[in-house]
Amino acid sequence: MSAELVSIAALLAIFVIGTVRAVNLGALAFVAAFAVGVGMLGMDASEVLAGFPAELFVILVGVTYLFAIARNNGTVEWLVQAAVRAVGGRVAAIPWVMFVISGVLVALGAVSPAAVAIIAPVGMVFAARYGINPLLMGLMVVHGSAAGNFSPLGVLGVVTSGVVERSGIPGDATGLFLSNVVFNVLLGLGVFFAFGGRKLLRAGRSDPDTDTAPGGARGVPRSPEPGGRPAGTGVATRLPETGAPPKTVPPTPALALDRDRAVTLLSMVAMVGGALVLDLDVGLMALTAAVVLTLLSPAQAKDAVGQISWGIVLLVCGIVTYSGLMQSVGTVDYLGDAISKLDAPLLAALLICYIAAVVSAFASTTGILGALIPLAVPLLATGQVGAVGLVAALSISSSVVDSSPFSTNGAIVVANAPEEKQAVVYRHLMKWGFGLVLAAPLVSWAGLTVLADW
């Protein structure tokens, strides 16, 4: 059996074993990388670990560390109150605010994981405080960032345009950007109404001055309804044994902006500026800010390291390391070359879109686009597939699946979800992400290559 087929078989085994037995998929992936790379392919350990995502590791650790301190010193609570005041207390608008801010950051040049790393932790606090489904909030942040991906100023937009130009393919940067925005806005609407948006619209307004939800109760979630979805805002409940009137939690007074909160906010602003203007690594900036805050107020940072999502770090880093091994042995090129030789160009285009979606759910979107767009050149030479449509379909297929918990964006969302809900968010993100792996290539291919040519 060839190295490419061995790597694919081992990947399937990882998911089967991880599903049947309660073993961290990341740990399984490290073992599989060692067994396949060293045991079967004769690689050195350094070659096996060459795909270890050091940058992603630092982002996950640094961001969750910083926002653990921000929660401890009240900065996140202050942000919650300020943002609710800014939208006039309309809780239903908050997920869309997160969507737009994430998209604008990415469209202006921030890499998508950087935007998600900055916005997702704040969004998750909103979710916990106002009874918003954390899955809704996380997906709105991820797809908001995805909407900005192919801006002419964005990293992916620049990279894709460069690959298209080098490959001699006709391009349309504006068309690519707008088609991606429309696709992700439609996904955002679907997410909003599928995961609790109707209840938020019915809930009305929260009081931004006292941080209370509609009805006078403090804006924290009630017990979830059957099926795991939050039941709405407020905590007014009726005692089942006595039938006593509803109890309400006293409102929380507005927080003052003290020294620690001001320094934390400045750190967050510096993260945004560093990512957008200086192209600095978000993870290293977050770690630097966390260390500075620890030196200023050791008591506020106590136990913050223990709040880092180490299980998620192991999970994602293991899977991405194994994905890097697959790329190093040529699995992606092997599949792409085989498909590009098919006699049916439209079918081959669809299959390449599927490869882009599947691999990008675990690996770098930028790397996948750089590898697969050139493979489309033989298909375009037949004249049966439109160049602009196929590039757009490939780009969308590879980017919208970043909601997978094995991608950087999805992993950041899971890592910043409330600890008691991380397992649920992880499972639902996996379903959503792999649902997009199945649906996004087909929809984008049909809309941008088949119907567009009619």
Image (cartoon, rainbow, N blue to C red):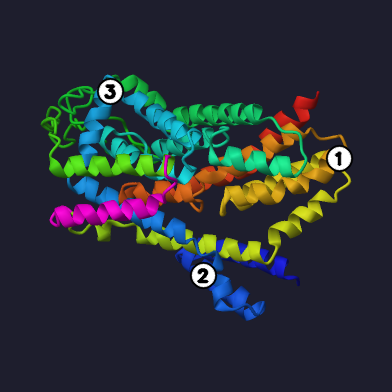
Position of residue 292 in the picture relative to residue 308 (left or right): left
Q: Position of residue 430 (x, y in %)?
A: 51, 48
* Residue highlighted by disc 3: 86
Q: Are marks 2 and 1 in contact (CB under 8 Å)?
A: no
Q: Give the structural element (helix, strand or loop) at label 1.
A: helix
Q: Position of residue 271 (x, y in %)?
A: 35, 44
Q: Could you say which quadrant of the image residue 39 lies in?
A: bottom right
Question: At x 57% / y 72%, what residue is drawn?
Answer: 48
| Mark number displayed over residue 101 | none
In depth, the one of 164 and 383 nearer the eye is 164
Q: Earlier in the sequence, mark 2 or mark 1?
A: 2
In depth, the one of 342 and 420 nearer the eye is 342
Q: Amino acid at mark 1?
A: Ala
Question: At x 45% / y 65%, what residue is drawn?
Answer: 22
| Mark number displayed over residue 30 | 2
Position of residue 365 in the picture relative to residue 300 (left or right): right
Q: Give the structural element (helix, strand or loop) at label 3.
A: helix
The residue range painted magenta reads 277-300
Q: Amino acid at mark 3?
A: Ala
Depicted 167 relative to depicted 52: above or below: above
The question of residue 280 being in magenta is answered with yes
Q: Viewer-nearest of labels 3 and 2?
A: 3
* Residue highlighted by disc 1: 381
Q: Earlier in the sequence, mark 3 or mark 1?
A: 3
